[in-house]
Amino acid sequence: MAVHCDRCSPAAREFVPGVLVDTLLERCRAKGLRRTFLLRKVLSRLVSHDHPLSIPTLLADEEVAEACDPATLYRLMERLESHQIVRRVGLHERAAHYYLNLPQQHRDFLVCVECGLVQALKLSCPIGEFDEEVSRSTGFSEVFHELQFYGRCRTCQQG
């Protein structure tokens, strides 16, 4: 059963296909990662949320917390990132958040420099078509970009 938080969109709170988790597990296996309970649980959590999750948020799941310590989860997230299964966003030194790297899905983010809040932008990306132009003009394949804006969130402005 998917666990959602109040930040998830109504679409994410609806049915989340287990097929995506199985597909991601196959991608992980093809990259040489073992199919463990922890891997399945982390992928399920990421699939069931439409915003990036931090390690403390992942550890708030009882089953994840019982399956590993924070260092093990951190190493798993690093491996998933190095194999391009997930992407990391946020203030990397203190508030890294992770989201699934899915084909044909692009996200841009706003990051609070004070508290580390990561929020997906609900705006169309101003440089989305530029990826294709870069690919055509340079011969690079699988071109992508990551756009992050930094500032202070409303809560931190009031505090």
Image (cartoon, rainbow, N blue to C red):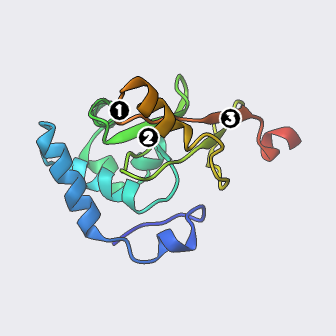
* Dot placed on the residue nearer the N-terminal end, 1 or 2: 2
Q: Quadrant of residue 140?
A: top left
Q: Residues within 10 Å of mark 3 (few under 14, many from 20)?
A: some
Label 1, on which residue? Answer: 74
The label nearer to you, 2 versus 3, is: 3
Callout 1: SS: helix
Reading the image, the residue beneath label 3 is 149
What amino acid is found at the position of numbered circle 3 in the picture? Answer: Phe
**Residue type (three-letter) at the residue carrying disc 1:** Tyr
How far apart marks 1 and 2 lie (CA) works out to 7 Å
Circle on res. 55: 2
Q: Is residue 151 above or below residue 107?
A: above
Near-viewer residue (29 or 44): 29
Q: Left or right of 96: which side holds 70?
A: left
* CA separation in Å, label 2 and label 3: 21 Å
Q: Quadrant of the N terminus?
A: bottom left
| Front label number (1 vs 3) | 3
Residue 5, position in %: x, y?
53, 63
First reached walking from the N terminus: tag 2 or tag 3? 2
